[in-house]
Amino acid sequence: MSLASLNSSISASETQAIIEALAAKVRFNYVLQDKADAIAKAIETALAEGKYENLTGEKLSEAVTSDLRSVNGDKHLKLVFSPKHVIEEEPPKDLTKKYNSDGDEVDDEGKVVEQEGSAVVDANMLSFHEFCSYNGHGVAGVEILPGNIGFLTLTMIGPPGLVEPFWASAMTLLQHTNAIIVDLRKNSGGAGSGGLLSYFMSGRKHYKSMFWVPENVTSKDYTLETVSGPRYNDSNPDTPKRPVYILTSSKTFSSAEAFTFFMLDLELGQTVGETTSGGGHPCAFVRAGHDHFEASISVGRTFSPKTGLGWEKIGVPPTVPCAAGDAKDVAHLLCLKTVEARLAALQPPALTKAMAKLLPTVEEVRKSLDAKVGHATRAAGTPVKKTTTTTTTTTKSLSPQGLLTTTTKSSIITDYQNIA
């Protein structure tokens, strides 16, 4: 099939083929099988009611995406119109494969099947690799803020095998800072989070589990035993840990949320900003019955092996809540308070001349930010207190099999309330 013009309407027969193919693939592949039929029926009903008649490719994609998400709000579900590229049919899934307890494919003797690189990197992943290279591999900025505070801006998270050298370069520049802020406010995700996570701890650790449909298997993801650059913190309990803050917004999505979620889950850092978008279902792209339409379908669910919880639909709430626009200043202020307290507690010879020269700068910038952020938080109606508060939150999530679970957690929040 081909399109005569970007502004041409998709014919009735083409539209029907798109919806029929997409509905079938949703029923077969969607991770929450108790919702799959309802999602498929939503677009089938819309087709029968004439909702998709005489629409251009872009408008059809928008309408179908809205209906796909209408059942349970899964933001990884979408139909994509690609007028300049032909979408190839994906190979059928082999459901006869066997897997071990880590989710690795094994042969009849239980030995892990070695995967050739060319076999596991499909057309969509190759396209994503290219996209990464055109976008600085997600590393949009590396700064040293006043007070020797590192600031790393990431706009996407690529697969470790491709982008880990670029993380290494960034971490080399930031290795001697007093604290680090990782800005994910405009990060819409990517592929994988364990490689980046590995720069903030040491050793190989099972940090993430993923339940996959239709294979009906749970895989385990591990942090990296070795990384190319300097780790910012390690897992040695006797080693002092430098503060790590992650900036989030309502637009922080998918793999960026995974990094945020597991940094909190492993107690490797804190978050500042807004609750994230809520995309905890990894997806696969499939052809949708037409040369120029493909669909993203959620085929898995990500969750903590420690708690069984994830962030689908509910997002990752911040440790320190504030408007996304204020998050950098708030995190900077929190870092400076920590640095100032540590420097003020030192005496010679531990307090070197260089450290002593840094202290006035830290104090000056801290006071400036104190006034600025205090005003901003009051304008936004955020309560500002000088006392430590304890909050209790109730989180709802889904088990690997889609069962609803409820967890109540109490947390102590101090730093942000101390700003004013």
Image (cartoon, rainbow, N blue to C red):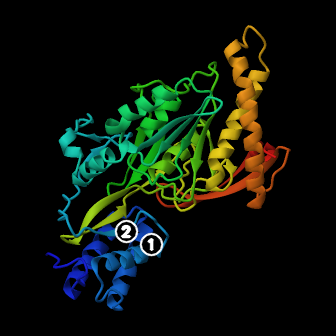
Look at the image and tell me whether residue 198 can be seen.
yes
Q: Earlier in the sequence, mark 2 or mark 1?
A: 1
Q: Is residue 303 left or right of residue 338?
A: left
Residues at marks 2 and 1 touching, judged by CB atoms closer than 8 Å:
yes
Camera-nearest residue between 354 and 174: 354
User: Residue lying farthest left?
Assistant: 1
- Where does residue 416 sit, x and y in percent of width and height? 75, 45
In the rendered image, the quadrant that contains the N terminus is bottom left
Outermost residue toward the top?
349
Q: Nearer the viewer, residue 10 or 17?
A: 10
Residue at the spot of label 1: 69
Numbered disc 2: secondary structure? strand
Measured as percent of width and height from the top left, residue 292 is found at 21, 70
> At numbered mark 1, what does the secondary structure look like: helix, strand or loop?
helix
Q: Please tell me how crowded label 1 is: few (under 14), some (14-19), or many (20+) other residues with Cα within 10 Å.
A: some
Q: Is residue 93 above or below residue 126?
A: below
Residue flagged by tag 2: what amino acid is it?
A: Lys
- The three-letter amino acid code for the residue at tag 1 is Arg
The answer for how far apart the CA atoms under marks 2 and 1 are is: 8 Å
In the rendered image, the vertical position of residue 114 relative to residue 351, given as above or below:
below
Q: Which labelled disc corresponds to residue 78?
A: 2
